[in-house]
Image (cartoon, helix red, strand yellow):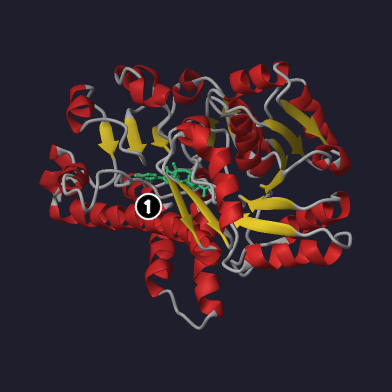
Amino acid sequence: MKIAVIGTGYVGLVTGVALSEIGHTVSCIDVDPKKVETLSKGIPTIYEPGLEELMVKNMRENRLSFTSRHKDGLQDAEVVYIAVGTPQREDGSANLDYVEQAARDIAENINRNLIVVIKSTVPVGTNRHIRDLINRHTMKGVQVTIASNPEFLREGSAVKDTFHGDRIVIGTEDQETADHLTEINRPFQIPILKTDIASSEMIKYASNAFLATKISFINEIANICETVGANVEEVARGMGFDHRIGPDFLRAGIGYGGSCFPKDTNALVQLAGNHEHDFNLLKSVIEVNNKQQVILLDKIRNRFDSLAGKKVAVLGLAFKPNTDDLRESPALVMIPKLVELGADVIAYDPIATERAKQVIHVPVSFTENIRDALTGAECAVIITDWPDIKKMDLSTYSRLMKQAIVFDGRNCYSLDAVQEANLEYYSIGRLNKEQAKVG
Ligand code: UGA
């Protein structure tokens, strides 16, 4: 099948590469010629394990190409995927400008009937709106049909998630389109759920909102655990054995970030509000997360009378490991607050420092060497559970730091290990023996 994909961000690029890997001929279109130039050389514009190999392989086998010209990309396409961003507007709603622009570009550059698939996360009703927009603006006699096909991949494991997903959701209004898309996706060998368009659009928002709810729930439990002397990891383990609850997404920490949960939870609150439904539960999930992102600050303030002139090592900047994405990362909230308290912040991340320099505008130094960050520091603040931070020999803290005081926002270490390494250690929802005695 000949397929065009509009947008080469996380979703678009991974979709294009994956569809070429299962045998389709894919042309990826992006309005940014610089991006297209880089991609055409076989260099991915995002950091994603396993992506480059697949990209290069399928380009070599002539199944994958990149262009900034819609006319070229859409020339032979039988199916067009829209995978452009839907960023958050000031009021929390999803901004559909890029999706609408992609629709106009399709309308102006096709001369026969085809299927348009929306991968971008869009509010209920958008698929129909986009179908009508294209059909209104395209040449006489040409009609597109529309399908909603939401994306469930996670940054950092996007390739793995695409080939080993739990389900593929296809929302259409006619059987023929549903059959076509089933055929396209069959080689993935992932269960396919066919449904109506509105339900498909809602499945995406409801899934992200539910996962965000799980995280805020366990974070609230973690905060209560600290006051009653329970251990949130034990609690989560005990809960997770119940198959109705499940063990995943019950890791307590300093809250969720990224380009999806914060944006999609806000958009769903907004969507509900537009239909006179006050989504109180989800509003609380968001509020809990906003508080959780700065929860370590209270612990730091309780421990130090003043941070003025003190070297503070911030370990990890990305919103989660295996990505250089900083969008809505707790680091973006924590670092300015630490600087405000007078701290001399040195921030470590194995891959996100270049991006961080562009978005962090307070005086901070950056390093890609964890030892530089820790040397002479009065405390360390863990924001991201990068494998190298988790696997580090814990004696490194006491060897390099002025005082081995660690505020761990991701519960990277076991309480036994930190006790053995003699660290002064503060984590989320777990008190060590000393703190429990004081508490
Ligand atoms: C999320 C969803 O997991 C994907 O299914 C979805 O496709 C994607 O959004 C999207 O809508 O595009 P992503 O944002 O890449 O994926 O990252 P996650 O792995 O879900 O993590 C999100 C945040 O939750 C991270 O900050 C992570 O540290 C945090 N998290 C996750 C926790 O604090 N605790 C957990 O137990 C799990």
Please indicate, yes or no, whether residue 130 appears anywhere in the rendered image. yes
| Left/right of residue 326 with respect to residue 404 in the rendered view | right
Q: Quadrant of ligand 1?
A: top left
Residue tagged 1: 295
- Estimate the x, y position of residue 325 in percent, counting from the top left: 58, 38
Q: Residue at x 61, y 67 (%)?
A: 93
Q: Residue at x 18, y 23 (%)?
A: 420
Which residue ends up furthest to the left in the rendered image? 437
Residue closer to the observer: 79 or 368: 79
- Estimate the x, y position of residue 34 in percent, counting from the top left: 82, 32
Please tell me in which quadrant of the rendered image residue 425 appears.
top left
Q: Residue at x 30, y 21 (%)?
A: 394
Under mark 1, the amino acid is Ile
Does the Cβ of the disc 1 residue fall within 8 Å of ligand 1? no
| Left/right of residue 187 with respect to residue 392 in the rendered view | right
**206 over 193 or under it: above or below:** below
Residue closer to the observer: 286 or 86: 86
**Quadrant where the N terminus is found in the figure:** top right
Mark 1 residue element: helix
Q: Residue at x 71, y 16 (%)?
A: 60
